[in-house]
Image (cartoon, rainbow, N blue to C red):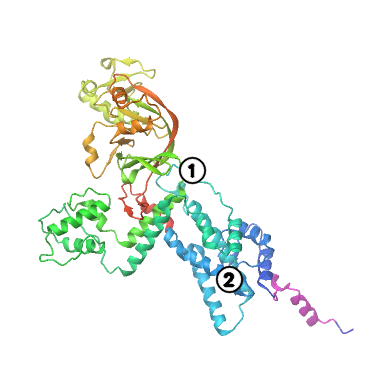
Amino acid sequence: MGKFTFFTFLIVFTSLGFASGKPFFVNSTSEQLRTILEQDNPGEKITVREIPLQNTEQIYVFYDGRNYDESWSENGILTEQAYELRFEIKQAKFDGLNPSDYHIGLIDAFFKTFEANKKAGKANDFMELADLDLLLTDAFFKLAAHLERGKVDPSQLDSKWGISRKPQKADYINLLNKGLQEKAIRRNLEQLYPDFTIYRKGREVIRALDELAKKDSLDWKPIKIDKSIKVGEVNNAIPQIRQRLQFWGHLKSAEVGDARLYDSTLFFAVKSFQEENGMEPDGAIGKNTVAGLNASPSFLMDKASINLERLRWLPDTVRDAEFILVNIANYQLDYINKLDTVFSSKVIVGKRYHESPIFSAQMSYIVFSPYWNIPTSIAKNEIIPAIRKNPNYLNQKNMEVVTGSGKVVDPSTINWSSRSFPYMIRQKPGGSNSLGLVKFMFPNSHSVYIHDTPSKSLFEKEDRALSHGCIRLQNPVKFAQILLKDDPSWTLEKIDQAMHQEKEQIVNLPRKIPVILVYLTFWADSKGKPHFRQDIYGRDADLLMKLKN
């Protein structure tokens, strides 16, 4: 037997695969995957080309369950499913997501290398195949999570989103195995879309805007005006307005005799644009119309993306159910039963600094001829200073002072200059009551409810962010009639009588109805028509930044 030299030892050592902690010789992608995963440090993220993977725990379980067999290649060649997943990653932009979140740059680089190898008749490197396998698997898990529950955690936003984020329901490992076995990656990812028709329609709107953006050659420098422009007036902004209305299909031609004149043809185009964008179609080119005209296809893609993310946060338990939906940004309430919109009404919502909150609660009762128990902040900042100036203020406003137990207090016995005020002020039932003649109660920590209002003219305004946070309803009689429809004794006449009493009357509903207050500045209807609204509370920018990060 020959001598066992150091050289012989080195050959044996390296052939057994112990040099540098990793084998030099592996003869399959599966072996390479096993090596990477078994050699990795427990508790730390797996890295591929210095990129940390986000779903390390799921990756270990997934590959262990398949005995480390590769997922996205066979015999050293990429499968159709690998190409399908890459395509879906790129299509994620139509969900308002960022393909770069799912390693698309490095994935594309690997695909380019493998396609070049194929042309050259060269075998693909097992290490590179293993790296790509891990990248694609991590991308699938991350994309699945974002499609099901959203990329951004709403609790991290500057503006409060008070609706509980839906829990994860899908098992992403099972979903991936199913997608690979069925050779249907797309179909299985689509199962994670929010269970709302408007979500899929919204994706198609983004797709159409993306195509439009490719052909867009307009200068979208913001149009600025000092005051509203009306028909017959001349303004330097009119040529740009004509161009943009033609771009959006509301005007056939931008060519006219006097380019700066607001003529009748342009008037009808402006009205068409206003109506499509939820504005008062009065033909006057004011700040809201100009803001709409300043929105480029790219800007609208971002706005749609923001709202698809909001839809991903919403619980899907309301499908085929009875619920009340208030879209604050659209100033509208819809009563929906089994996907049928039974009732719609204009609403007034909170002012910019008294924003209506986003939350959900259960409507359980109606109060006819209500008292308005004035919130402490309003009493302190508005009512009491008014009483100091005008001692007859309470009488004029049909208000009274009561103790905590409801006992009426003579206002002349109160020292209105004192900082201490151990009472409550309330407005008595009647036509002048700030809550109107009825309120609809869904108890919540925000002290927000839906109610009537004596100021009916405010519903004609285009901007209806005018309240202290509660939701004022334009047609409360019809709404009460619908909610009480199961009790035939509640005729229209009885409802009217209940709304004109000297004392309030509480009527419990036979069932609790979910009320959902949302903030959607974009949605697509069942026919795929897009609807864009103004960001009245300035909430879109923060979410867009986090979505694109």
Q: Nearer the viewer, residue 369 or 546?
A: 369
Where residue 371 appears, as percent x and y from the top left, is 32, 24
**Secondary structure of the residue carrying numbered label 2:** loop
First to last magenta residue range: 4-26
Q: Is residue 85 magenta?
A: no
Q: Is residue 91 visible?
A: yes
| The disc label shown at residue 132, or none | none
Q: Which residue is mark 2?
A: 79
Where residue 23 appears, as percent x and y from the top left, is 70, 73
Examine the rendered structure and indicate whether residue 340 appears above or below residue 83.
Answer: above
Examine the rendered structure and indicate whether residue 334 appears above or below residue 480.
Answer: below
Q: Is 412 positioned to the left or the right of 90 in the image?
A: left
Judged from this view, the residue extending furthest toward the front is: 488
Q: Is 330 positioned to the left or the right of 244 in the image?
A: right
Q: Is residue 20 magenta?
A: yes
* Amino acid type, residue under disc 2 in the picture: Thr
The answer for how far apart the CA atoms under marks 1 and 2 are is: 37 Å
Q: Quadrant of the N terminus?
A: bottom right
Disc on the earlier residue, 1 or 2: 2
Where residue 178 appears, as percent x and y from the top left, is 60, 59
Q: Which residue is mark 1?
A: 317
Alpha-carbon neighbours of circle 1 within 10 Å: few (<14), some, or many (≥20)?
few
**Secondary structure of the residue carrying numbered label 1:** loop
Instruction: Write the residue at 34% across / 50% down.
Output: 521
